[in-house]
Image (tube, helix red, strand yellow):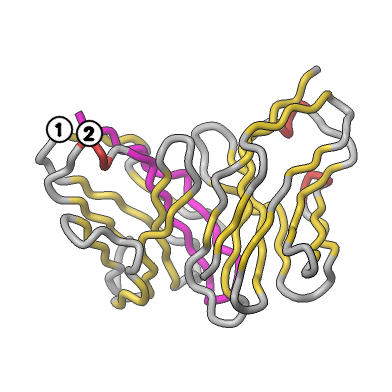
Amino acid sequence: NAGVMQNPRHLVRRRGQEARLRCSPMKGHSHVYWYRQLPEEGLKFMVYLQKENIIDESGMPKERFSAEFPKEGPSILRIQQVVRGDSAAYFCASSPGQKVEQYFGPGTRLTVT
Amino acid sequence: AQSVTQLGSHVSVSEGALVLLRCNYSSSVPPYLFWYVQYPNQGLQLLLKYTSAATLVKGINGFEAEFKKSETSFHLTKPSAHMSDAAEYFCAVTLGATGNQFYFGTGTSLTVIP
């Protein structure tokens, strides 16, 4: 059973470009979570999705950030018009349901130049 | 509100010595608590979890943690450190009954000295 997969592992974007981060949950998991990790900090929750639904986006910046988890295909975290402050590691996690442990992917390290 | 505090951002121990990584939490409802380990340039791996069953929880790689409600603590221990234990360790809390998001501490970097 493959774990949570994220791609790309490293992404470099110039200021103003768009960044698309992909996450494929573990087989059988229908709950996906996105977190952001800044240097020397812990992970900060961004958004929680189930298939085709955003359940909790309380951690998402109000502008430029969006997420989706379509019926088919991976979950996508999209950052429009990236700025240097968006440089971070973005982790996706999945779980088979609520109230259970989350399994993390290897992360996507975004660098904005 | 839920939060996690990890005391000590850096901990160094000698190989073979006791490992103690501290975690205190605040939660308005009975919490679920987790410890994760992160090796360089990798994602987080679950070490152990507390979900309101036994207060002493055993995890992988010889780690264990004890839930102490009176102290609102969930400290991680290992009797004898190994070089391969060097990593970043994160404590996390979620609402026991309706938890979605995890609240993570800022992490403790463990160094093991040969």
- Left or right of A37? Residue A69 is left
The structure residue drawn at horizontal position 66% and vertical position 44%, both measured from the top left corner, is B7
Segment colored magenta: A88-113
Query: Does residue A58 lie above or below A108 as drawn?
Result: below
Look at the image and say whether residue A7 sits in the magenta stretch.
no
Mark 1 Cα-neighbour bin, 10 Å: few <14, some 14–19, many ≥20: some
Residue B32: % across, % down: 65, 70
Residue at the bottom extreme of this rendering: B97
- In the picture of the structure, the residue carrying the numbered disc 2 is A112
Q: Secondary structure at mark 2?
A: strand
Chain letter behind tag 1 = A
The structure residue drawn at horizontal position 29% and vertical position 49%, both measured from the top left corner, is A21
The structure residue drawn at horizontal position 65% and vertical position 32%, both measured from the top left corner, is B10
The amino acid type, in three-letter code, at marker 2 is Val
- In the picture of the structure, the residue carrying the numbered disc 1 is A14
Query: Does residue A1 lie above or below A48 as drawn?
Result: above
- Left or right of A110? Residue A89 is right
Look at the image and say whether residue A97 sits in the magenta stretch.
yes
Chain letter behind tag 2 = A
Q: Contact, CB < 8 Å: mark 2 with mark 1?
A: yes
